[in-house]
Amino acid sequence: MLIRKNPPHTLLILAGMLAALPVSAEEAATRLESITVSATRFPTRLENAPGQIEILTADDLEKRNDVRLSDSLKQLPGIHVQTGRGVLQPIQSMAMRGIPDERRIQVLLDGVPLNDGYSGGLNFGALPPDAIDRVEVLYGPMSSLYGGNAMAGVVSYTTRMPTKTEFAASVGYGNPFSAGKAPENLRKTSLSGGTKFDNDLQLLAGGHWLATDGYRSEWVTGTTAPAAGFSGWSSLPQKNGAAGYLLGNKGRTEWNEDGEFLKLEQRLSGGSRWRFGWQRQNYTYTSVDPQTYLRNAAGTPVFTGCCGASPYLFLNGEGDYERNIYQAGYDSELLGGLLKVSAAYADIATNSYITPTTGATVSGGPGRIANSPAQSQMLDAFWNREFDQHGLTLGLAWRADQAKSEEFTLSNWQTASSLSGVYAKASGESTTTGVYAQDEWRLRPALTAHLGLRYDYWRNSDGSIRTPGWTPATQVNRDYASRDENAWSPKVALVWQANDALTLRSSLGSAFRAPSLYELYRSTRVTYTILANPELKPETVQTWDIGADFKPWQGGEFKLTLFANRMHDLIYIQGSGAVRNRINAERAESQGVTASLSHQLTSATRIFGSLTHTNSTMKQNSLSPLSEGKQLTFLPKDQATLGADSRFGPWTLAMNARYASKQYASDDNSDVANGVPTVYDAYVVADAKVSYRIDRNFTAALSIDNLFNREYFSYYPTPGRSWFAELSYKY
């Protein structure tokens, strides 16, 4: 089975379809209302913001078929979100403006970081997108305000709060156009309700439930030439281009998730406000009905005897995840300004999965079970006030993370309680304390300077690795001494509003990220081994950018940004073989350009598009010389988006297309093959959604994802063309 390549004319076909959209006779407004940006911590008008910022409103989000929070970012310039397995992919790799990996992007939900305390990654599973009212994306290093995970930028999601009694419900169902090519029997239900009481108390509560029978998204391949007498296999190159063979698949991945939330806010007398929130994420998955394509001389399906195949290679175990996030906050006027205090606690109670191992069969046999619970405590307090031409922000932030990962051997991989021995254990704690200051200085009516500085003190303690029988011996049974680091993160930006149609921006900044507990202490063995590195140092980046926002004609807006990043001690995976190491690569660089254009054809119809080109290079990596001169992993060289949306009467039509060039997962860029498992192919994908407002309360919608049925790999074979129908009610 081979994957066909994307035709180069797909974007042109979509462009022609978009040009045929119906339009209203109304003229577009000459200028959008001024928008206030809150993620900069000081309320700032969009035109005065310290860098490129993109904002999505509730109206924008309603026009899309977003299943994960990260789906809302796919159409934005300069951001790359891996497709993966779609709804079956709760953790999606992301890159932003020349800096790879989602760990280097700070993502907030109502001000609370979603980056977890174990890996620093982002798990969007069971977080309902329906309750989101606004998304703000701040490009470039924001460690001067947000600390370690904000190397590439900040994404801030805000939940809507009711201004009157409201209720919303939606039910949906979907399937692929071709059986087995995308998640099947997809069911989704969302409910929410809230009100605003006479005492200004606002309450919103809701839930989100989703389930699918999945699709066959994990292929079983071999590297040994088939023996005589065996049939059913097919040739399929390995990711490095060498000869390989397709032997079967691991079955369908069945998925069930639910997420619930509660939000409370109340404005008190004197301008004070308190708030409380709770968010739960929970999902489970399992694989069923594995298939072998191999047939012996008698024509009987077999899981062994040929091509290096073994029954356990066709098996996948179940997994389970649950996280609860609690937050509380209080705002109060103080010393002529506003003090905002927020506290949060995130508890990953379960993060487990089962791996069948050598000797396992469909009916049972040995395996391993891993579970990695983690807890995070967060406190952030900042005060801001205007002084003549200055907008001052002073803040204090503290975060403590604890994580423990335990992996046990199982006598029966189908029974999670059949523990038979310790396979690997790792644990550790980290604490980061930061103080920061920022001044928004209006030098002249049209010229604004943003001056920011943050100091962070990071301490790592109680590190432990237990891996009986593993090599190297230094990681078999060892505790690690506490250590600490500190970092200064400055940022300087200038914004000149030359006239109503032109704004020029430029910024210089520095950011850092400390290694996560996972990177320091957790060695993993699945298809290959990645060794922990307790000696990892924090990584840093120095960046500059210069950009312009230009409104060249009525209803049109053009944005252009040139950027460059200099990364030092980049935390990287060394090699592409059976054993790989986590290392600090001495120096890497990326530079590029992002351009976007939008045009409001009428008050009801908009078209938009963007191009991003990034040159990334590993400049110095003495521990992995083969990576020097190569493109950075998980970072496409070229990206493009094209889209349009229109309202006409009760109808709404939205269409978009996305392009990304090939990415590499190996530091030496040896994964050169296309259309095979574990590679990241170039792709062009188009989606469409049409909605019809039946009356003031009911709306029906039909979405088609992967409109042109492009087949490509994003590690897994990505979902093919599918449809999803939804009926929603709002009161």
Image (tube, rainbow, N blue to C red):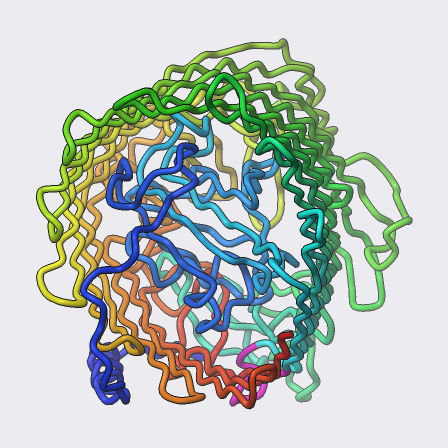
Q: Is residue 291 above or below residue 256?
A: below
x then y, percent, for residue 113: 56, 38
On screen, residue 472 above or below 550: above
Reply above or below: 148 against 688: above
Based on the displayed image, in which of its 4 quarters is residue 463 positioned? top right
Q: Position of residue 233 (x, y in %)?
A: 53, 78
Q: Is residue 179 magenta?
A: yes
> Between residues 284 and 496, which one lies in front from this camera angle?
496
Decide whether residue 500 is among the magenta residues.
no
Task: Decide if residue 622 is on the left or right side of residue 197.
Answer: left
Residue 668 shown left or right of residue 117 in the figure: left
Residue at point 44%, 75% (across, down): 235
Instruction: Answer with the quarter of the image where residue 585 lies.
Output: top left
Question: Is 456 positioned to the left or the right of 119 in the image?
Answer: left
Residue 619 visible to an observer of this rendering: yes
Q: Position of residue 421 (x, y in %)?
A: 85, 37
Question: Residue 131 versus residue 429: which sits nearer the camera?
Answer: 131
Q: Which image quadrant is residue 360 in?
A: bottom right
- Residue name at image x 24 percent, y 81 percent: 26
Q: Determine the residue positioned at 58% across, 65% down.
A: 130
Quadrant of the drawing holding the C terminus? bottom right
- Residue 304 in view here: no
The part of the chain drawn in magenta is 173-182
